[in-house]
Amino acid sequence: MKIHRRNHRHSRLILSSLVVRELLQSTRPRSGVKDRGLSLIELLVALIISLVLIHAMAHIMVSEVQLTQSFEEHSNIKDATIRVASMMQKEISYASDLSVPASDPTSCGLNDPLVITGPRKMWTIVYGFAAQNPPSGWVGPMTLYRCGPPYNTNGNLNTASGQSVKSVVLDKLAKVSPWDTVINSGDLANLSNSLSRGIKVQFNMTSVRGALKPYVFGARSAINPLYAFGDQVANGSTYLTTAPSACDDGSATSGSTNILNNICYQTVTNHQIIYNNTNQSEIDKRQHFYIAPNPGTLTVVGSPLFEDIVYLPNLKSAYTIQSTASSSAQCTRASCYVISGINEKVYMQNINYLVFPDAQIGI
Amino acid sequence: MVHTDMTTRQLLLPVRQEPKGYTLIELLMIVIVISVLSGAFLSTQSSSFVGFTRLKLGAAELSGAMAKARDTAAKNITIDTDCSIVQTVNQSTTNVTTSLSPSNCISTSLLPSAINLRARSGASNLTLNQGAVFTFRSEGMSTNTDATVTDQTIRLSDPRSNIIICINLSIPTAMIRQGLIQQGKTQCDYTAK
């Protein structure tokens, strides 16, 4: 038992001396091994490893910052786009006419224009692109301009003295095809632009990191004739406050028979409009032509002074819409012809609206 | 036991060294020297750097306040109502305050709080080239009492910075842009990164 205890103590001593040796070897050079320090090669290797690590970390940090900036930029672009779209939708909703002519008919001189004409041509707003893009101070590559009456602080258009202001409303549009404006696309493609009041606008945006998802919105001018008095002004007429009586400003014939009083009646309403910046009361007269099913061949002529609306009995898809019986050219306000089967052929002049059970078309 | 004692003594004996590389002490000395030199260099640059950094903070505060007023108008003012948020930037005090026109057309609790650009940025010498009144209405659009104005700009500067920052509000679409005027230039460059 004693022998065993002494052996145990002896082994503990050996163990502790081994630990001490290990510790000393870790802090001091082994006997016979030179204390070399760090050689230049070792330092360079350490430096290179450090640089690689620092570079990797810096790359991650820079990427993170760029991602944040990119997100912020996209967010700002989207916000600006939404505001412009909202403004355009509002202006279009007030308009009596929309067009995308080949060249700007106004003095604004914008390229690829969208022309929005207000009721009675009281105002005209043009959206488009200036010859110089981007203009000084803007990122571009293309910037969208608005040229037209400015807004008052109360949010109303300032049409006083016909002043027109041209300003950049949207930046960072793509250089090629910065926007697409399509009026009456799809099944209304056979109508001329000037007939239609619906539009699809697509902004093709770009950022420092390349093209963004396009922003598309639709807008429609008011089909409500309250806002559409194109006839009066388009025909050189003046603002009228008195209405002629009865449905007698146009004509409706079936062959040689006058059927005006059979298919037409007038509505006369009194409402407030803003004209020359003042609130005025206007008597608004409309002539409504109701086409019966299978009416044969009719000729309907509306008034050049007031709203004329033709109500057709069949769905729009049942009709062929063209200029005249012999011409498949586009239907215009001056001349429009609709055919549905062999028993419904209606030739129209000076008509402002075609109303189908499933669609309305402003002409 | 004897073996163990001998080993320990052997280990504790002084070791003959032939230092050939850099020791830790030498490396530390180099680091210290580099730190001192770079510190001396940076101290000459820090004034301008701090000035510009403070200026950027002030610009961020101003553009942030404008964006907040614009977004508040967009969210809370009904379309086509006669109500607008008026934000006033005082040139001398650099206070940015917000009010309603007409008053109480929406709840005043929705309005952004007043801020002081100098206090917020820490740039006690921050100056503005002019005051301004920004007006935001429904849909987040901007207007001006002079309907022909198409944009408004405020320039922020600090004596310690040789760069001037411009904040620009476009009318009517209320785009808020930030640009720089580099030393020797007079025009705001909104394309600078």
Image (cartoon, rainbow, N blue to C red):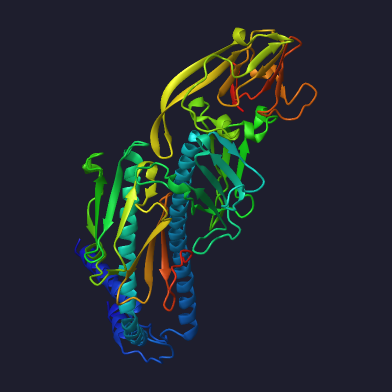
Residue A134 point in image, percent of width and height: 56, 60
Q: Residue furthest left?
A: A2
Q: In this view, does B56 lie above or below A155?
A: below
Residue A184 shows in this picture = no
Instruction: Report the residue at 62% width, 47% height from top.
Output: A105
Q: Residue A349's image quarter? A: top right
Residue A326 point in image, percent of width and height: 80, 23
- Residue closest to the eye, A170 or B7: A170
Residue A183 point in image, percent of width and height: 62, 35
- Residue closest to the eye, A248 or B147: A248
Residue A73 point in image, percent of width and height: 46, 54
Instruction: Report the residue at 44% width, 51% height from top.
Output: A76
Residue A69 shows in this picture = yes
In which quadrant will I find the N terminus of chain A? bottom left
In which quadrant will I find the C terminus of chain A? top right
Q: Is residue A342 above or below residue B122?
A: above
Does residue A181 appear left or right of residue B100 in this picture? right
Instruction: Report the residue at 34% width, 72% height from top.
Output: B52
Q: Is residue B17 above or below residue A84?
A: below
Q: In this view, does B91 lie above or below A355?
A: below
Does residue A222 appear left or right of residue B91 in this picture? right
